[in-house]
Amino acid sequence: MASSITQAREGKLYLMCGGSEKAFRKAEPILKELAASVRFIGKAGEAAKVKALVNMVMNINTAGLAEGLGLGDALGLDLEMLRNVFAQTGANSRVLETDGEDMQNRDHSCFFSAAHAAKDSAIACELARQFGLELPLARATKEQYERMIAEGLGELDKSGIAELTFKDRHKSRGERERSGVS
């Protein structure tokens, strides 16, 4: 499944299925009742690989959006205007639609936790390692989500990565210890 809680509630899931095609075809009518889209990916395990890649790209997009909005905020730009410009340009993404306003307003109600983002990013990085591929953006994103966990922010929604990128939003444990704040 590559969908959000909202999509699940609306019956608009995107299901990716792996296994025998015969079993898939037999279950397909039921699956179509649950989802807006159902796709047969291939043999068992193939859908899990695709899901890992979907989440890897989503996590990279989320981190990139947080950086763009964080820098825009530091530059004193109106973030609603900036989000509208992003939506009309090559900066557009589904993550902008689902997380942009939440990043701006610091509403990180959990739909997909930072801890899950770290786990899924690690899965993708491990798959890349197995094939001798370097994925610097995926690795950097994984490290940011792991930092969120280390800073006690792992149960925030993935959009909470903005807390690490917006100026003066979050002090690291080391910074808090140096300033005498716990």
Image (tube, grey):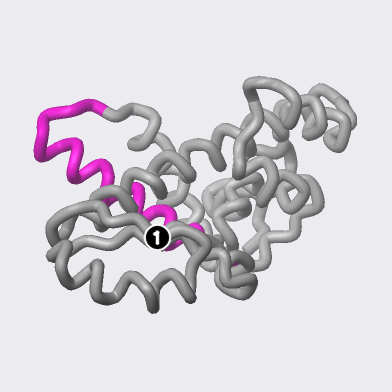
Where residue 124 appears, as percent x and y from the top left, is 27, 45
Label 1 neighbour load within 10 Å: few <14, some 14-19, many 20+: some
Is there any visible trace of residue 154 in the rendered image? no
**Does the stretch in magenta take in 115?**
yes
Where residue 173 appears, as percent x and y from the top left, is 54, 54
Where residue 100 appears, as percent x and y from the top left, is 71, 44
Residue 74 vs residue 122, the one in the foreground: 122
Residue that mark 1 sits on: 38
Task: Decide if residue 6 is on the left or right side of residue 79.
Answer: left
* Residue located at (64% from left, 71% from top): 10
Where residue 115 appears, as percent x and y from the top left, is 44, 61
Indicate the amino acid at tag 1.
Val
Vertical arrangement, residue 87 with respect to residue 54, above or below: above
Is there any visible trace of residue 159 in the rendered image? yes
Picture quarter with the N terminus: bottom left
Task: Decide if residue 79 is on the left or right side of residue 99.
Answer: right
Picture quarter with the C terminus: bottom right
* Residue located at (46% from left, 58% from top): 37
* Residue located at (16% from left, 58% from top): 45
Numbered circles on residues, count: 1
Q: Secondary structure at mark 1?
A: strand
Provide the residue span drawn in magenta: 111-134
Residue 32 vs residue 162, the one in the foreground: 32
* Residue located at (79% from left, 25% from top): 85
Residue 22 vs residue 70, the one in the foreground: 22
**Does the stretch in magenta take in 117?**
yes
The dominant secondary structure in magenta is helix
Vertical arrangement, residue 42 with respect to residue 168, above or below: below
